[in-house]
Image (cartoon, coloured by chain):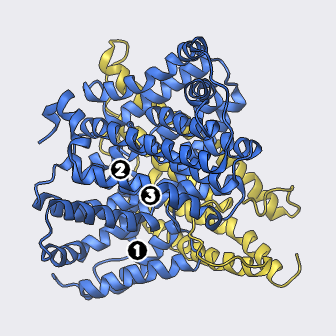
Chain colours: A blue, B yellow
Amino acid sequence: MTGSVLSPGMAALMLFGSFFLFMFMRVPVAFALALACLPILAIEPRLDTMNLMQETFNAYNSFILLAVPFFLLTANLMNVGGTTDRLLKLSRTMVGHFPGGLAQINVVLSIFFAGISGSSTADAASQSKIFIDAQTKEGYDLSFSVAITAVSAVLAVIIPPSILMIVWGGILTVSIGALFLAGIIPGLLIGLAQMATVHAYAKARGYPTYPRETWRALLCATWIAVPALMTPGIIIGGKIFGWFTATESACIAVLYAAVLSLFVYREMDLKGLYAALLDTGKLAGIALFCVGTASAFGWLLAYYKIPEAILTGVSAWGMGFAATGFFIAFVFLVVGCFLDAIPAIIICAPILEPLAKAVQMDPVHFAMIGIVSLAFGLVTPPYGLCLMISCAVARIRIRDAIKDTGIMLVPMLLVLALVIVWPRVSLLLPQLISPEFLK
Amino acid sequence: MTDATATKPPGLWRRLTWFYAELLSWLLAITVGLLIIPVSLQIFSRYTELIPSYIWTEEMARFMFIWTIMIGAMIGVRESTHFEVDVWPQMGPRGEAVARLFGRLGVLMAGLVFVSAGIEFTRFAWKRTSELADLPLWYIHVAWPVTGFSWLAFLGEQVVADLKIIFGRA
């Protein structure tokens, strides 16, 4: 070490120890991360609290993260402007007659939503309001309704566009276009796994179903939803063909959602607009403030070269390709229990990258393992944002929905295992459409 | 959770913080809306001849973005919506108030640090300007002490409310 007072081990102990202590004391996570940095900043003569200010500033001063409020705003505009309603009707004509019709609609709407918005928290917030109450009224169990709403919301960050892919691509310089393409198949597989889970639940518990809609109704609903369904094409296509950057593609999504709300479906008024803007600001502020303090925390870890110390230990195990993949997934799943996904990427992805490189894992494949694992972290307690949001809307405690969430995670984890051992699940589409993105 | 905001606040201090929170909400909504402008300009200037390709759009967007985050973080404390991890068993109202109070003390500490270090951070940027638009940098840095002050302002009444519950005067 070059003139540090603390050894890496001591610094790691202080950082993680005080972080968990503060978190246990019910200090909000964003603040716990900031406070955990303070003892070290006080002890180390070369560092002081100005580093905390500067590191948070550096984190926020990022054109990439701007995509976060944009995707949140897209989702909010879709909700107030009637786009979500059209997609809901389309979902109903498609899967309403399956066993557990309304819950199936819940999953399919999440898939559509995921193709337009890149934010799972926005999905969880809006769909909790739509589905939880409606499902319980139709006789679904409350904990099941909360759990399926929360787990289907994670699709938003796996199916492109996705905030996590943009952040990952920005931090590890991986092609965001390739990540967008790579997420499509794993996302759809996870969606199918969830629909199968709903099917099993519905058969076991006798959940209701809707009468089958006519083909005509399906065609009509599709026709009405066409403008909304074009959004993924515009965003993902625009990114892949290099028409605009990732952040710009999120901005395009906002503009398109605004056009749909104002001119096509014409359901948005000024009050709705204000609510959408304010809601976006609040959620973005909370989520991103945490990114700043996590960056300061991660910066201190790097300052003491703690990641390298951890890595030399792990490299000595001599893991093969699949074992490394499972190890990476395991780390992200555990970290995802305690941290939001973006801070987790900032802190952990650079640490794990050399491990993936050592076994010649494609950077896009590595990214997909990380992103899917972190997406699952959005519903794993104690810190699973989507589950927290759905529980808050339903006014139940997280522990009341844990069992059903756990059951639903099992088939999703099987898909994750498939993504790990079979790289082509992620790499097939990027190879077909834009092989130049892959190294 | 809207601990102190649900009913119209009686005292002068509460009325002040209420107005301040309303003001922040409007500012937040406006900054979010404004964020779209520079990024859209950037895209349109690239594909049309209507507007020149301004160099300051990217920087402008970033700076407004910083204020958006910080105002959002202020309101998050006001509404107690910063996410926390709840590993404790269900408690009575008094136990909940004690647990909340611990969390608030943590935010209070962070607030004090943001004020003291933030003021130095602002002074540090006093005479510097931004790279592209030549904006005074302290316009941005001042968000840090302002955020710290706002947290302290909002925390006061929340701590008082918790103490009242703990000592059974609510």
Q: Can you tell which of label 2 and label 1 is closer to the viewer?
A: 2
Provide the residue designation for mark 2: A415
State whether residue A382 is above or below residue A428: below
In the picture, measured across the screen, residue A363 lies left or right of residue A59, that is: left
Provide the residue designation for mark 1: A49
Query: x, y percentage for residue A151?
Result: 52, 50
Mark 1 chain: A
The reply to whether the C-beta atoms of the residues labelled 3 and 1 are less than 8 Å apart is no
In the picture, measured across the screen, residue A193 lies left or right of residue A123, that is: left
Say yes or no: labels 2 and 1 on the same chain.
Answer: yes
Mark 3 chain: A
Separation of marks 3 and 2 at Cα, in angstroms: 9 Å
Residues A66 and A373: in front is: A373
Mark 2 chain: A
Say yes or no: labels 3 and 2 on the same chain.
Answer: yes
At label 1, the amino acid type is Thr
Q: For mark 1, give the secondary structure.
A: helix
Question: Going from the N terminus, do you reach mark 3 or mark 1 first?
Answer: 1
Q: Residues within 10 Å of mark 1 (few under 14, many from 20)?
A: many
Separation of marks 3 and 1 at Cα, in angstroms: 44 Å
Provide the residue designation for mark 3: A410
At label 3, the amino acid type is Val
Question: Does residue B126 appear anywhere in the picture?
Answer: no
Q: For mark 2, give the secondary structure.
A: helix
At label 2, the amino acid type is Val
Question: Going from the N terminus, do you reach mark 3 or mark 2 first?
Answer: 3
Question: Going from the N terminus, do you reach mark 2 or mark 1 first?
Answer: 1
